[in-house]
Image (spheres, grey):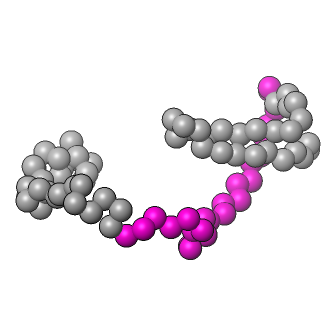
Amino acid sequence: MQTFQLTSFVDAQGILRLQSQLPLTLANQDVEVLLVVQSYPKNPANKRPIGLLKGQFAVPNSFFDNLPEELLEGFEGKA
């Protein structure tokens, strides 16, 4: 079995992309992939200040209204 390292990233469209430092020919081969998931740090270095948009945005009262039944059914997989 051939072993190689891939680098992954998410592009601007939100698609997971894989890259290799070496040219790979994987056509018509069985490929086993091992994903190692790393989490982001809990305390990012560049925190956004609290209240950054204070006075520039207001939440309308309708935000707290109940959602329409058909929308709720969509979330529950009934639609």
The answer to which of 55 and 28 lies nearer the viewer is 55
Q: Quadrant of residue 12?
A: top right
Q: Does residue 66 appear in this view?
A: no
Q: Residue at x 65, y 38 (%)?
A: 17
Q: Name the side, left or right, on which 54 lies relative to 1.
A: left
Height in image: 41 above or below 63?
below
Q: Residue at x 11, y 56 (%)?
A: 60
Outermost residue toward the bottom in this view: 43
Count all numbered tags in the image, as a single digit. 0
- Is 47 inside the magenta-drawn segment? yes
Q: Name the side, left or right, on which 64 lies relative to 23.
A: left
Height in image: 34 above or below 38?
above
Q: Residue at x 76, y 38 (%)?
A: 19
Q: Which portion, as a residue range, is magenta?
A: 27-50
Q: Does residue 68 appear in this view?
A: yes
Q: Main secondary structure of the magenta part?
A: loop
Query: At which x and y percent is residue 48?
Result: 46, 64
The answer to which of 1 and 48 lies nearer the viewer is 48
Q: Residue at x 57, y 68 (%)?
A: 44
The answer to which of 58 and 72 lies nearer the viewer is 58
Q: Name the side, left or right, on which 33 lies relative to 45.
A: right
Query: At which x and y percent is residue 53?
Result: 31, 59
Query: At which x and y percent is residue 69?
Result: 10, 50
Query: At which x and y percent is residue 6?
Result: 79, 45
The answer to which of 49 and 76 lies nearer the viewer is 49
Q: Quadrant of residue 39?
A: bottom right
- In the rendered image, the quadrant that contains the C terminus is top left
Height in image: 23 above or below 10?
above
- In the rendered image, the quadrant that contains the N terminus is top right
